[in-house]
Amino acid sequence: MPTVHNGGLVVGVELGGTKIVVASSVAGHTVETIRSIATADPDSTLSEVRAAIAEVADSRDIGAIGIGSFGPVDLRVTSPRHGEILASPKQDWVGTNVIRGLTKGLDCDVRLDTDVNAALIAETSLGAARSHNNVAYLTVGTGVGGGLFVEGRVLHGSGHPEIGHIRVPRRPGESHNSVCPFHDDCLEGMISGTAIQQRTGRRAEDLGEQTDEIMGLVAWYVASGIANLCAVVPVDVVVIGGGVSRLPGLHRAVASNLEEASGTYPPIPFADGGPAIVAPEFGDRSGIIGAILLAEGPIRGSEAS
């Protein structure tokens, strides 16, 4: 685990759709994971997270909390809904304000971003993409999400990027029914962990003899999504994380599919070989490291609009 930069106690919370991780860092010491909590209903889950934060603090003052939350979530600091989970497949969480839910009774700075943007911050600040200014982070897990780092800053706007909902052409012969409740043919609907389980009856880590077949399918769709993305934001590097990304050979297979998916256009980056496809240096820890960095303050590209 890396070290972080400033003094005082800070807490990071990676609020994922399947589990939550709570970690702390004191005075630049190594980040220490405190506990993991299964994501259940909002009230019980947020209560457990508050208990974990109290355990971390151990009666000490917390300087700041960084939250990387699953989305969609309102990141606009001027919005009356700042911190609220918006239209989401996790229906019981819609309308939940994660800032208020996690920091009830606390008086400290709170900095919020998406969970994928937190991972992006970790990988562009300290990890696999630290020497690059134009980066996409894509997580392929239970769902599919992504963030963009453009000219040295995390990209924010009226909302946050929803790379998992990029519409993609169907692979020839494809008859899969999308698992996305919003789109028939987006990345999340076609190749998320949920989609893989619907296709095969198995989790991605338990595919057995179907591993190569599903890996090839995922690589084809991810390459198509990257081709669409780069038509708008021609990034230099795509970091691909998440549980499904651990399918053997996936990163190489995505890279080998880029030429067909893009038609080598736009010429930059595709005619130059396409963006580099890499795994996150911090693996499953990218999100929680990024949440800690978010709490630490204005690390490279960490400001939300």
Image (cartoon, rainbow, N blue to C red):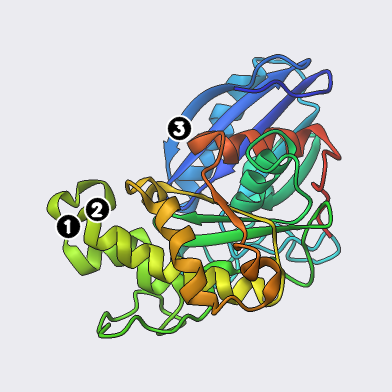
Q: Earlier in the sequence, mark 3 or mark 2?
A: 3
Disc 2: which residue: 203
Residue drawn at 82 percent across, 42 percent down: 300
- Of badges 3 and 2, the one in the foreground is 2
- In the picture shown, does residue 96 fall above or below 4? below
Disc 3: which residue: 36
Work out which quarter of the rendered image holds the C terminus and state it: bottom right
Task: Determine whether, in the image, residue 23 is placed left or right of residue 206.
Answer: right
Quadrant of the rendered image containing residue 188: bottom left
Of 66 and 45, the residue lying toward us? 66
Across and down, in percent, residue 244 comes to 37, 52
Q: Name the residue type under label 3.
A: Ser
- Answer few, some or many: residues within 10 Å of disc 1's Cα (few below 14, many 20 plus, some between 14 and 19): few
Disc 1: which residue: 210
Q: Name the residue type under label 1.
A: Gln
Q: Name the residue type under label 2.
A: Arg
- Of badges 3 and 1, the one in the foreground is 1
Assign a secondary structure to mark 2: loop
The answer to whether one can see residue 103 in this image is: no
Quadrant of the rendered image containing residue 81: bottom right
